[in-house]
Structures are given as structure tokens and as C-alpha cells.
Image: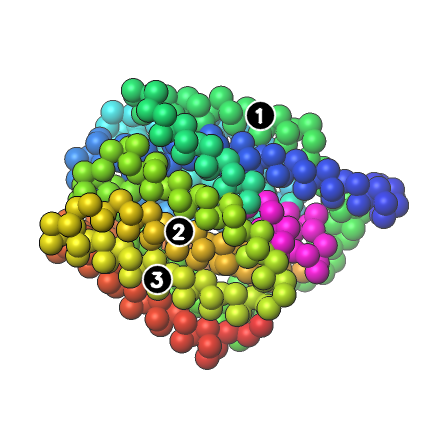
Amino acid sequence: MNILGNSEEIDKVQKRNLWALFFIGLIYGFASRPFFLVYQPFLLKITGSLFITGILVTLGGIILFLPKPWVGRLSDKFNRKKVWLLEIPLFFTGMIFLFFAENLIFLVPGIILFYLTEVVGEISFNMYISASSNKTKKGILFGLMFFSIFIGNIGGEFFVLLNIVRDIRVYFLIYMIFSVGSYLIIIFVISDPISKQLKNSAINSEISNKKQNMWIDIFKTPKKRAIIIFFTLDIFIYNISLSIYGAGLRAQYGLTYEQMAFIAIWLSITLMISQILGGHLTDKIGKKRTLIMSELFGLGEFSIFILAFVLWTLGFHIFLIPLLSIGNILMGLNGATFIPSAQIILTDLDETRKAESYGIIGFLRGIGLIPTGIIGGFLTENVSYVVPFILSFIGVLFLIWFLYKYFQE
């Protein structure tokens, strides 16, 4: 530990990193939320089809998981900060493509580059939280970092509610401008919280021995295999309906962007209020129990979305916005109890190759994401808007059973 000095010096670096990550989350939450609110409707406006929109959403999902093992390996092998800085050119190039997109020629490369940015950012952000956290307080610290994102989300949603932007592409520019602040924090504040000597030792000795066995080890270990199955099924089941949720609100109910922002703000408020509590709960009662609680909130979430559709179909339109808001509150409780447990599990799969193991699980989870946008878009367009939500509800029942039977604490 000579490079950073004694343990007190390392502790200072970790605290500085956590404060930096908190502000990065705050900026990201505020700047990205308006963009993501209009993203699916933006795709729908260009394509004119929920089915094609679903395919493009799936493309983004594929890019979000496909490179994860290799980005994770780079993060473990080389300086994490340098890998994180790769996000900068990817982000601005991708956003410029999306900003000028009028057809698939610009849209597709924009989606690919933008989601590559998300991969690098997600892995780097979570690895720094894990490396800078006390092991007994990881749940609450993950909760605190995501709390900052959700505070930012609320600010971004209120900005949309002001209805001062006439062209939704302005939200793309705002995202790019505010992201400059995040990147300056990464460049000038973030530091590696562990000794370079320790890191190199881990890579050159123990890690090199496991290099060829990482994938095999994950599949052969019963505990890790259960983790793969659960998280892969979870992302598949939820995204059958949620992958085209934003576009569906426009296509099915004809909601305005302001109405969508109003509904979404209840999700962000709930996440903000309950995220730290969710992290504390994870530390206290364990990851398995917290995940089961999360899935119970998921059942309530899909029940409300189904009820909202039924009442709207029967002509009771007055209940739509309140019920969708309640559904988003339950979605927030679902996320607040899911995120800390999931991040602790996924960042601690392997002590010496944290980022690569995180990336491998992300890759395998992504396989479950591949068909969801296509399935959701097809069912919504050709059967009924409510069918994907019914399938998700049934799937969550299965997830609860799986957690009880196969998941280890």
C-alpha cells in the first residue's frame, strides 16, 4: 500500500471517490432523465411503428450487454479510470448521431455508440462504489449512490413538466452539456482506491491462473448458476412489458410528454425516498429476503398497470393517470429493494476479477433481454397492450418461487 501511503490515506481516497460518485450520479440523473423520457417516443416518431421501435430498443439492449465481459476485463487488467474515460468520445459521438437522426442511417449507429457509453459507465461507476465501500455497509452505500441519481431524476422530470422545450432534441443538447461536468469530475477527482501494487499482484498471479476458467467457473458453481438463472429470467420477465412501456404510453393512451413526466416523477420520488432504506434493509435482513420483497412489489406494479388498462378500456379514463402513478410508486419500491441487493451480488462474484465477472453476468443477463422488445412490440401491436403485462405478472410469480427454492444468501 506504499503508492497511496498508509490506510488513512487510502481511506481519504475512498471517501473522496464516494463524494465524487455521488455528484456524478446527481448530474447524470438530472441530465439523462429528460432524454430517456422522450427516447422511445423519439424512436416511435421516426419509425412510425411500435414493432420497429421494439427492435431498436432490443438493439440498444444487446449493445448494453454484449461487450460487458470485455469491458470488465479491460477494467480489471488496466487502470479503471482510463477505461472509464473511454466513455467520453463514445458518448458525444453517439449523441451527435442521435441528435441529427431523421432515419435509420443515423439512428442505428447513434444507438450503438450511446449504449456502448452506458456499458463503460455502468461498470466503472459500480466498480468504484464497490471498491470504495466498507464491506458491512455496501448495501446502504449503493443505496446512497443511486439515491443521488434519483434526486437528479426528479429535477429532470420537473424540467420536462415546465413545458418550456418545444423541440425534444433540446433535451439531447442538455444531456451533452451537463455531462461535461461529470467527465471533469472523473478526470480531476476520481482516483484508484487501492494500491497499484496490490492490483498488479492480483492480476499477474491469481487472476492469470483463472483467466481460462472464469466462464466455466460461473456455470459450474451452483450458487453462481442460480444467480445467472435468476437475474436472466428477471430481466426477461420485466422487460417483456417494460421494454416498450414509454412508447406504449404514447401509442395506447396518447399521453403528452408532460403527462409522462408527471407519472415518471412518482417513480423517481419513491426511489429517492426509499433507496437508502432499501440499502439499509439489505444489510440488515440479507440479499435473498430483500429480493423476495422486491418481487412482491413487482406483482403489485403489474397488477396496477393491468387494472389501469381494464378501467381505461371500460371508459373510466379519469383513473388512468392516478393508477399509472401508483404503478410507478410500486415500481420505485421494486427498484429500491432490488438495486442494492443486485449490485452487492453482482460486484462480489469474484474477489480478484470483479469487473470481468460483473461483465460476464451482464452479458448472460443480456441474452434474456434480446427478445423482449420484439416480443413486447409484437404483442402490443398485434394482440393487446395489456398482454405483455399479464405475462410479466405470471413470470414474477415464478421468480418468487425460484428465489425461495434455489437462491442462497
Mark on residue 300? 3
Q: Which numbered marker is on residue 329? A: 2
Task: State whether residue 161 is above or below residue 205.
Answer: above
Q: Read off the magenta span.
A: 129-146
Q: How far apart are the alpha carbons under marks 1 and 3? A: 38 Å
> Can residue 375 be seen at all in this image of the molecule?
no
Name the element at disc 3: helix
Res 181 label: 1
Mark toward the start of the polypeptide (1 vs 2):
1
Asked whether 26 or 240 is in front, the reply is: 26
Identify the residue at image location x=35%, y=71%: 397
* Residue 244, image x, y percentages: 27, 47
* Contact? badges 1 and 2 (CB < 8 Å): no
Crowding at dot 3, Cα within 10 Å, few <14 / some 14-19 / many 20+, comes out as some
Q: Is residue 107 above or below residue 285?
A: above
Q: Secondary structure at mark 1?
A: helix
136 falls in the magenta region: yes
Q: Main secondary structure of the magenta part?
A: helix
Furthest residue toward bottom: 405
Q: Is residue 73 left or right of residue 206?
A: left
| Sequence-first tag of 2 and 3 | 3
Tell me if label 1 and label 3 are in contact, CB under 8 Å.
no
Residue plotted at (57% across, 25% down): 181
Q: Amino acid at mark 1?
A: Gly
